[in-house]
Image (spheres, rainbow, N blue to C red):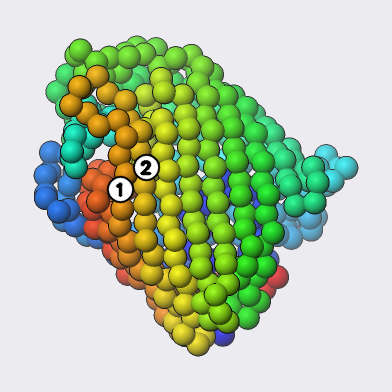
Amino acid sequence: MTGPLLAQSFVDLTEVRRAQRPYSSVLEIEAGAIGTMAKDEDTTVGLENDLSWDGHLYYRDDAFGQGRNLLEGYAGRDGIYLGLADGSLVGDDTTSRLEFRARPWQFYRDAYYRGGSLVPNGFYEGSDYEAYAGFGREAQPGLYVELGPFYRKNKFSESDLATPGFAIPEDYDAYGGRLYLEQGNLQMDRRRGMPQEGYVLTLCGEREWNDSSGSIGSPGFTTELPSAVWRARGRLEWYIPSSDDATWEVFARGGWQDSTDRVQNFEAQRPLGDQWGDAQIRLRINFGDTVTLAPFVHGQYSHVSSDDPTAEDRKFFFGGGADAYLHMSDSISLHAYYSYLDNENRPSIRIDQDVHGEHMFFLGMLVRFGAQRQ
């Protein structure tokens, strides 16, 4: 039987509130090699040809404790997550959720675009650690609403790519409230354990207050982080069956954030700016129960403000690639992907250095232990 494409990410677990999974319990380990290639190498801004190790660890148990609790844990290059959802603590069909979120290996690229190049104001590193408590219930069939407070600690440090004279943010604490709205109706292919038809749309809005102090930026372009900021973001996954062995997939994320939030507007793992979008259109093809291939086209949008009159405020980027699995059994799969995007701002492939490029590729193995089907 085909192993389901269960590979998680930090964003999947922190953004989607009630994701359908093929397994009620599983321990999943993926490990392999990740690489990047730059069209034009420039080590002063991290554009390099390089190889590194990559992978993740994921655990799920939807019968934890008294039998109604869901326990999930994740650790990977993009972050660490631990969550416990309880359907009986509050009662009255309300789900309570406690989460710990950490991103120990963050990179920030305070920069703007000129032509096809990313021009740095200053690059630096950081980490954040957050606790969140949410309370949610169905407002109507298929529509889930969740609201809760969060508290986060932010730390920053100099990078190997530091620009002389650029003042990095001082460490600060933040707290606020977060509201989720999620509408979904997925149908799973029980034989393969993959989504077959339907969609999940998640919208999130948050208000944050912080105790930041000091200036950020280079001489002539310094700002202070305001004491309060707002953010809105959304995520869509949509599956459209084409045949018994082929399914169209649409994955999209986007955000609109306070333009004065100079820290989170320049996180390097997503498109830069106070308005951004990232979307893929994929065709997932199953060759029997052994091979799954998903070629895709990829697009991004960034709106970045700058005081440089030669800067381009709005930029669109395009590319594509393919994602493939070779299923050796229900518990072991080989995983490979390649992607290209004409954007110099791509996620770093390392946790100790900010190394990135327009081309990215991965080859690894995915193994599952103690998997129990839903």
Residue 102: percent from the left, percent from the top?
48, 40
Q: Are marks 2 and 1 in contact (CB under 8 Å)?
A: yes
Badge 1: few (under 14), some or many (20 or more) residues near its Cα, within 10 Å? some
Q: Residue at x 32, y 69 (%)?
A: 363
Q: Secondary structure at mark 1?
A: strand
Residue 188: percent from the left, percent from the top?
65, 70
Q: Residue at x 27, y 23 (%)?
A: 306
**Which residue is label 2 attached to?**
301
Q: Nearer the viewer, residue 151 or 122?
A: 122
Q: CA distance from mark 2 to mark 1?
A: 6 Å
What quarter of the picture does the N terminus occupy? bottom right
Amino acid beneath label 1: Phe
Instruction: Pick whichever of labels 2 and 1 is earlier in the sequence.
Output: 2
**Which residue is label 1 attached to?**
317
Q: Residue furthest right?
A: 92
Badge 2: few (under 14), some or many (20 or more) residues near its Cα, within 10 Å? some
